[in-house]
């Protein structure tokens, strides 16, 4: 099976998925491999990582397209070239509209740095601190046309400490993202995630 990863920057979640796929030998076990990493930012660090690891690394620079629709069309063409069974958004900072999502629904995952449905959108750590919540975390979910609105597959919870800044809180959450995202990817690839009444059910209690 082919995995295509979409990023915009650092790509640490991509690296975590790559490491898990190698350590757990997804290539023979699942079998699945990361076929390409695509970024809307040409200078994304994750593209360098992909190149270094011998993975196709492609930039589809959104600033070169007159509108969202033409950007998404080109992105779709590049993605489809790899016949992906799974499209993984990992720090991909562009909103995808129904035109992109609908034909690929059920095959696109995202990770959002908050316990959805709380704190959709940007600046989640600042907003969590502002709200005074005692726990925060990250959510892996199917992508639907509604922003951060698809069925939730896995969540990781971290405590919010009195001394936290947005950065320390983000760092604590990110560590767990690196654990849950590879797990969920693997479960989806192995068809262990089912949709029941619009809710995702994964047969792995640890994620
Ligand atoms: C993560 O915190 C993820 O939740 C959010 O963007 C960040 C991406 O980090 N969507 P990285 O590029 O995977 O390092």
Image (tube, rainbow, N blue to C red):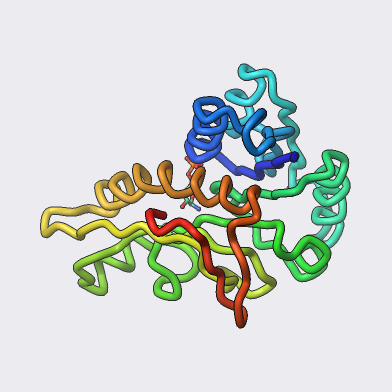
The C terminus lies in which quarter of the figure? bottom left
Considering only vertical position in the picture, is 190 above or below 108? Answer: above
User: How many marks overall?
Assistant: 0
Q: Is residue 40 left or right of residue 171?
A: right
Residue drawn where x is 79% and y is 68% of the image: 102
Residue drawn where x is 65% and y is 48% of the image: 189
Residue 169 in percent (x, y) is at: 27, 52
Q: Is residue 35 visible?
A: yes
Q: Is residue 51 left or right of residue 49?
A: right
Residue drawn where x is 86% and y is 55% of the image: 73
Say which of 25 and 43 sits in front: 25
Residue 145 in percent (x, y) is at: 69, 72
Say which of 135 and 121 sits in front: 135
Residue 83 in percent (x, y) is at: 84, 44
Q: Quadrant of residue 2?
A: top right
Considering only vertical position in the picture, is 180 above or below 121? Answer: above
Residue drawn where x is 66% and y is 28% of the image: 28
Considering only vertical position in the picture, is 159 above or below 92? Answer: below
Residue 107 in percent (x, y) is at: 71, 57
The N terminus lies in which quarter of the figure? top right
């Amino acid at each position: 099976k082919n995995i295509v990863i979409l990023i915009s920057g650092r790509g640490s979640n991509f690296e975590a998925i790559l490491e898990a796929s190698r350590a757990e030998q997804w290539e023979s076990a699942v079998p699945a491999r990361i076929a390409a990493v695509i970024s809307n930012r040409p200078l994304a660090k994750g593209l360098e990582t992909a190149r270094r690891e011998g993975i196709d690394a492609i930039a589809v620079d959104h600033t070169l397209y007159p509108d969202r629709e033409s950007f998404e069309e080109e992105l779709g063409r590049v993605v489809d070239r790899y016949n992906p069974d799974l499209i993984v958004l990992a720090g991909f900072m562009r909103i995808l509209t129904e035109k992109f999502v609908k034909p690929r629904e059920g095959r696109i995952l995202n990770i959002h740095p908050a316990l959805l449905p709380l704190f959709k959108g940007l600046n989640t750590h600042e907003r969590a601190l502002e709200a005074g919540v005692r726990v925060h975390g990250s959510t892996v979910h199917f992508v639907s046309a509604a922003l951060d609105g698809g069925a939730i597959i896995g969540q990781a919870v971290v405590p919010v400490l009195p001394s936290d800044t947005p950065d320390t809180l983000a760092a604590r959450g990110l560590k767990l993202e690196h654990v849950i995202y590879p797990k969920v990817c693997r479960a989806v690839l192995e068809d262990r995630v089912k949709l029941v009444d619009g809710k995702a059910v994964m047969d792995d209690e640890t994620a």
